[in-house]
Image (cartoon, rainbow, N blue to C red):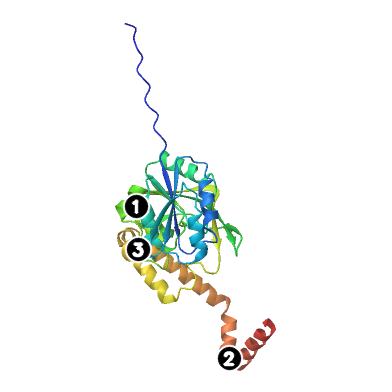
Amino acid sequence: MPHESPLPDAVSAPPLVSVVIPCYNAGDTLLETVKSALSSAYERLEVIVVDDGSTDYATRVALDSLPACVVRVGQPNSGLPAARNAGVRRASGSFILPLDADDLIEPDYVPEAVDAMTADDTLGIVYSRATKFGEVEGDWALPDFDVDRILVENCIFSCAMFRRDDWAVVGGYDETMRRGREDHDFWLRIISLGRGVRRLEGRYFHYRIRSSSMNHGYTREEYVQVYAQIFRNNVGLYAEHPEALIRHRFELMDELNDLRHRYAILERARLRWPVAYAGLRRLRRLRGS
């Protein structure tokens, strides 16, 4: 009998990616966002739209107009983090890309992010450079990522790829953070797993700016409560890097001392001639009106 060569190993399929789009009364932009996701250059892709209890007519029309390939999930209004979690629970992909219903992505974003994730199994977050559009236009000049920086301020936008398994380990997004900053908290919890972070150099994410954006309108006390919650959720990570908070404190002190030095003459004038100073301020307001 002639010798038969063994069959070659089957080529494994590339990983499935799930793009999760939470939607609450975003009928004016939803279809454009879904189109940008479906235009991805990556073939193994599913798009999931989570209707978070939308009430307006335009959104109901947009939801009914979604392409048949889009998975639709409905729930009572529960907030953005709960809608993201609902989408991830429904997702079949091993990689997740959250995309808000008024933002856009470029076709190359998903394939390049997948390449990075599959090439390095220590990575937990992959994002790109970004631009702003809408009421503000131009590059979004986020600071470079490092652990010390992200403990103080978020430098990764919400539309970054992560592993579904990591989402399960950290317990998903904190659903109590309905006013925002839930993505900052979520990234910290993934980083606390020892995962790495990589930024792609392409400008593959477009962030829509409008006055109704969620992060507008915080009072100081609301900021305090939100960041206190982030600290509580990630106290172990902060304990590993206490120097970050201490350095930040001294940087703020240096800025304050510099401002005091720059404006010392004006402050002395205000204290010595308060009536004249008040008159000058009124004159400036009148000229500006």
Q: Secondary structure at mark 2?
A: helix
Q: Nearer the viewer, residue 178 or 87?
A: 87
* Residue type, label 3: Glu
Q: Residues within 10 Å of mark 3 (few under 14, many from 20)?
A: some
Residue ID for mark 1: 89
* Quadrant location, the N terminus: top left
Q: Nearer the viewer, residue 149 or 71?
A: 71
For marks 2 and 1, give the one nearer the viewer. Answer: 1
At a point 55% along the width and 76% down the height, the residue shown is 261
* Residue type, label 1: Arg
244 vs 278, left or right, is left
* Quadrant location, the C terminus: bottom right
At a point 36% along the width and 48% down the height, the residue shown is 164
Q: CA distance from mark 1 to mark 3?
A: 14 Å
Residue contact at pointers 2 and 1, CB within 8 angstroms: no
Residue ID for mark 2: 272
Q: Residues within 10 Å of mark 1 (few under 14, many from 20)?
A: few
Q: Secondary structure at mark 3?
A: loop
- In this view, which residue lies farthest toward the top? 1
Q: CA distance from mark 2 to mark 3?
A: 53 Å
Q: Secondary structure at mark 1?
A: helix
